[in-house]
Image: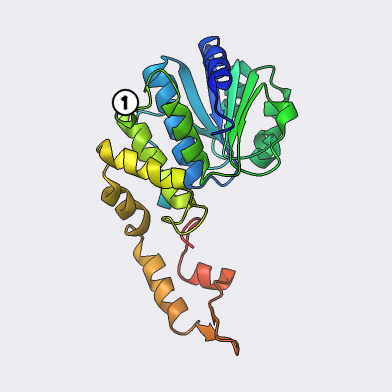
């Protein structure tokens, strides 16, 4: 991959080895890919590099994807504890931004992140990365997800030697979940490297069926009842033959739908 080479890996290791307090950050309203990539980064930093590392998110994640966060990983949510989140950013000497192209996508965290004197690394798959704001950038749109991009970085590190079985299990499971959600289970933004990643993780013993079950077969009764209504009374067919369903705020309130369940 063009953005991952010996020089960039050496610079990554140099920045991490020279840091004592690391904060990993992702975008507001974190989705499965944001959680998968940050969780894997924390597992690598803490389990394989022995670092004091915390993930700071602008908002608490939806219940539908919260399972991706390993119990061993420490997360702070700015919407529930803004003082602690700001204090952690201020004391960090390395910040890693994942799954977004600019600090602007962290909303409430943007100012403390930009004001921070820490060294900064970007790991992202969106267009137009804000390269000037970072000391090191891993960025390419030709990949399924930030989870896949970080997987490729892990595979280039001496800790793994290109062997997926040497990735910490919690990190591997999080990466597979993050990639799966961002591709809608291989329905979009899929590349040959995406299938190789999945194949290598399966060969390493990761239970994909269990991951799929948590993502797609673990909804609350409220969501199932709303989907029944949407596919029944709410369903409309346009003159062109397209099926249309509209989940208005009123409908979501009626069924008690939570963030992430649509």
Image location (x, y in percent) of residue 69: 40, 38
Image location (x, y in percent) of residue 193: 45, 43
Classify 8 as above or below 66: above
User: Which quadrant would residue 116 be assigned to in this image?
Assistant: top right
Q: Residue furthest bottom?
A: 239
User: Which quadrant would residue 178 be assigned to in this image?
Assistant: top left
The local crowd at label 1, few if under 14, some if 14 to 19, many if 20 or more residues have their Cα within 10 Å, is: some
Kindly identify the residue that appears in the image at 37 percent across and 32 percent down.
Answer: 171
Q: Is residue 63 visible?
A: no
User: Which quadrant would residue 218 be assigned to in this image?
Assistant: bottom left
Kindly identify the residue that appears in the image at 64 percent across and 39 percent down.
Answer: 106
Image location (x, y in percent) of residue 86: 62, 26
Residue position for label 1: 166
Q: Nearer the viewer, residue 80 or 6?
A: 6
Q: How is the image coloured?
A: rainbow
Q: Nearer the viewer, residue 240 or 84?
A: 240
Classify 102 as above or below 217: above
Kindly identify the residue that appears in the image at 56 percent across and 47 percent down.
Answer: 29
Classify 250 as above or below 179: below
Q: Residue furthest top?
A: 18
Image location (x, y in percent) of residue 149: 51, 36
Q: Is residue 105 left or right of residue 158?
A: right
Q: Is residue 29 visible?
A: yes
Number of numbered discs overlaid on the protein picture: 1
Helix, strand or loop at mark 1: helix
């Amino acid at each position: 991959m063009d953005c991952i080479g010996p020089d960039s890996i050496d610079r990554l290791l140099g920045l991490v080895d020279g840091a004592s307090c690391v904060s990993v950050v992702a975008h507001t309203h974190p989705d499965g890919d944001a959680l998968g990539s940050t969780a894997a980064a924390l597992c690598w930093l803490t389990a394989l590099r022995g670092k004091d590392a915390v993930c700071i998110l602008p908002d608490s994640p939806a219940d539908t994807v919260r399972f991706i966060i390993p119990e061993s990983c420490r997360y702070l949510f700015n919407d529930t504890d803004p003082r602690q989140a700001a204090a952690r950013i201020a004391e960090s000497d390395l910040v890693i931004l994942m799954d977004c192209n600019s600090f602007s996508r962290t909303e409430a965290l943007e100012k403390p992140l930009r004001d921070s004197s820490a060294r900064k690394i970007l790991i992202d798959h969106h267009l137009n990365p804000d390269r000037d704001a970072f000391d090191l950038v891993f960025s390419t749109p030709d990949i399924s997800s930030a989870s896949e991009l970080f997987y490729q970085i892990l595979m280039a590190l001496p800790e793994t030697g290109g062997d997926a079985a040497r990735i910490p299990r919690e990190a591997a499971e999080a990466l597979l979940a993050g990639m799966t959600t961002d591709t809608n289970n291989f329905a979009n933004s899929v590349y040959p490297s995406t299938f190789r990643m999945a194949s290598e993780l399966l060969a390493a013993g990761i239970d994909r069926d269990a991951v799929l079950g948590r993502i797609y077969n673990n909804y609350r009764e409220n969501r199932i009842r709303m989907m029944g209504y949407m596919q029944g009374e709410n369903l409309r067919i346009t003159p062109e033959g397209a099926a249309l369903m509209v989940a208005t705020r009123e409908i979501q309130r009626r069924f008690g739908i939570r963030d992430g369940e649509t």
